[in-house]
Amino acid sequence: MKTPEPTACHEMEALLPAYVEHSLPAAEAERVAAHLPTCPGCQLQVTQLRALSDDLDAALPEVPRTALRANFIAMLEQQKAQLKPEATFAAPPAPPEAKVVSMWPTALANNWLRIAASIVLIAAGVLLGRNLHWGAQPPADLAANTRPAHAELAQALTGSNGNTVSASDRIQLVTNSSRQNEPGDPTVQVLINTLNFDPNPNVRLAACEALYRLRDDSRVREALVHSLPIQTDPNVQITLIDMLVSMRVRRAVPQLERLAKRPDALPVVRAQAEAGIGKLI
């Protein structure tokens, strides 16, 4: 199979979002369709764009704040009063009940808005990873009541004890488990396994945060470096990059260089990896 020229792929990248949205002119759409079977890199980007599109369409609409609704109703009544003066002797009819309209469109109007929303989605996950629990400690009474021994923790997280544990419960277990910070604590290995193998990316993010709080343990830095090539979720990838840079782990540079060149990584992840390299070398 003939390998596509880099310049051809670069030209096609600009057309892929519109191609996924079915908004390209017929001639351009035919060019992209003819290019895709010969280019695994562009095929992967189309798959990622479609996945992000499905996630955005499935997101719940955001309900406007109460103050926004009240201001809107007041403005509506003022405009109605200007357009239709009240009758002299007749009482004005009761205003119809205002409907709360979602401020978030269920279908994005154009390709640039779709791309911007995708970046916001990833950035929100990154901020969640940075601010969820970095440096914070869970309430003492909750940790004392729920923190299991490391063997029980491993069974609960993997479901090997026969009980099904939801992702939110696993996040709470992981968060509570990081209060102990003693040399050789076996909980560290449980958290490393969770970071590498839990199927839910939010649980893996919580494991990142827990390990960051236990960063004085000699195993943590090496585990974060080795986990970087395993991860495929962009939020987890970016969180790991930020943690490795924050801890000044220079031996992570080779892994960051590989991630910056991975064709299956999103552009924002590759850019973050390149920025991390610049800070560590």
Image (cartoon, grey):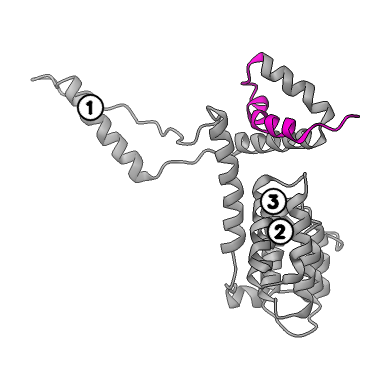
- What crowding class fits label 2: few (fewer than 14 Cα within 10 Å), some (14-19), or many (20 or more)? many
Q: Residue furthest bottom?
A: 183
- Amino acid, disc 1: Gln
In the image: residue 57, left or right of residue 10: left
Q: Is residue 165 above or below residue 246?
A: above
Q: Quadrant of residue 26?
A: top right
Q: CA distance from mark 2 to mark 1?
A: 50 Å
**Residue 51 makes an appearance in the image:** yes
Q: Which mark is residue 270?
A: 3
Residue lying at 55% horizontally and 31% vertically, measured from the top left = 106
Locate the N terminus by quadrant: top right
Q: Is residue 174 above or below residue 237?
A: below
- Whether the magenta-drawn stretch holds residue 10 is answered as yes
Q: What are the residue bounds of the magenta stretch?
A: 1-26
Q: Mark 2 — residue?
A: 203
- Amino acid, disc 3: Arg
Q: Earlier in the sequence, mark 3 or mark 2?
A: 2
Q: Residue furthest top?
A: 26
Q: Residue furthest right?
A: 1
Given residues 39 and 99, the one toward you in this image is 39
Q: Residue furthest left?
A: 88
- Whether the magenta-drawn stretch holds residue 39 is answered as no
Residue lying at 79% horizontally and 72% vertically, measured from the top left = 222
Q: Earlier in the sequence, mark 2 or mark 1?
A: 1
Q: Which mark is residue 79?
A: 1
Locate the C terminus by quadrant: bottom right
- Amino acid, disc 2: Val
Given residues 8 and 105, the one toward you in this image is 8
Q: CA distance from mark 3 to mark 2?
A: 23 Å
**Residue 146 makes an appearance in the image:** no
Name the spot of residue 23 as percent of width and height, x first: 61, 21
